[in-house]
Amino acid sequence: MKTRETILLLLFTATLHGLTRAQTIIVPIIAPIDSSTGVVTAHAAQGVIYARPTQSVVFHNYLLETFGPYPIVGSAVTAGLDQFTNSPPEWNQGMAGYGRRFGSDFGIGVVRTSTRYAMAGVLKEDTLYYRCQCNGIFGRAGHAIVSALTARRGADGHVVFSFPSLVAPYAGTMVGVYGWYPSRYNAKDAFRMGNYSLLVYMGGNLALEFSPRRSGALLSRFHLRNPHGAPDSETP
């Protein structure tokens, strides 16, 4: 447990450092589109055009983020770290222990992602990730971190605080703790694990922000496209 906490603490420190040194985040100027005519109803001298993702796009991203290669590889890595630290020790070592840890991490991820998408659907929020329309490492890093707790709402895509994004990491770990973890685990452990999940999600946003934009990039060749990101915005 100490090893994982140390690794995640370093990640948290690095992200906070980037956020505190961040330049002013540039929020894109949004121009809504008339869905019946496809005509931009308001123009901005600078910025991007926001087009709310279709249900098909959202569902595709949900499947990819929940059952695609990223969650599988992520669960495998996390289970390996848990195996190394023997957490929880009640699950022992060997392939049986690794299998339980992998299933646990994958199950928590399914609950976490399903909660975020379901709640976002009810609240009509767009929780896909949009790259920063700004320059500079620190500005883009700050945008990626803040976006872990924000979403877009309405036809104009204005940015709001996202309750689904805040709740989802803790919903997953709560279900895991009270569903299949040893009985000695409680809400305090679930909250601690949820904090780790939120930090990992921020790390995923950073990866999306700084991943190559070219369609022929290496990740695209292996069909490892972003798990919760929207297509790059178009300029008007």
Image (cartoon, rainbow, N blue to C red):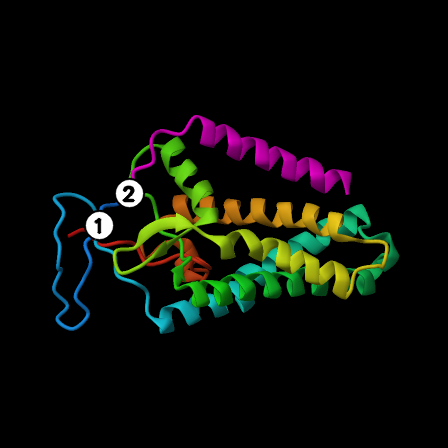
Q: Are marks 2 and 1 in contact (CB under 8 Å)?
A: yes
Where residue 200 sits in the image (x, y, percent)? Answer: 57, 47
Q: Tag 1's secondary structure? A: loop
Q: Which residue is painted at 54% across and 32% down in the image?
A: 14
* 155, above or below 35, in the image: above
Q: Which mark is residue 48?
A: 1
Crowding near pointer 2: few (<14 within 10 Å), some, many (20+)? Answer: some
* 103 sits to left or right of 147: right
| Secondary structure predominantly adopted by residues drawn in magenta | helix
| Vertical relation: 96 (above or below) 13 | below
Residue toward you, 221 or 174: 174
Residue at 52 percent of width and 32 percent of height: 16
Let me know if residue 83 is in the magenta part.
no
Q: Quadrant of residue 42?
A: bottom left
For the magenta stretch, what is the residue range? 1-26
Q: Position of residue 162 (x, y in %)?
A: 46, 52
What's under tag 2, amino acid-wise?
Answer: Gln
Which residue: 40% across, 57% down? 128
- The residue at which mark 2 appears reads as 133
Q: Position of residue 222 (x, y in %)?
A: 45, 62
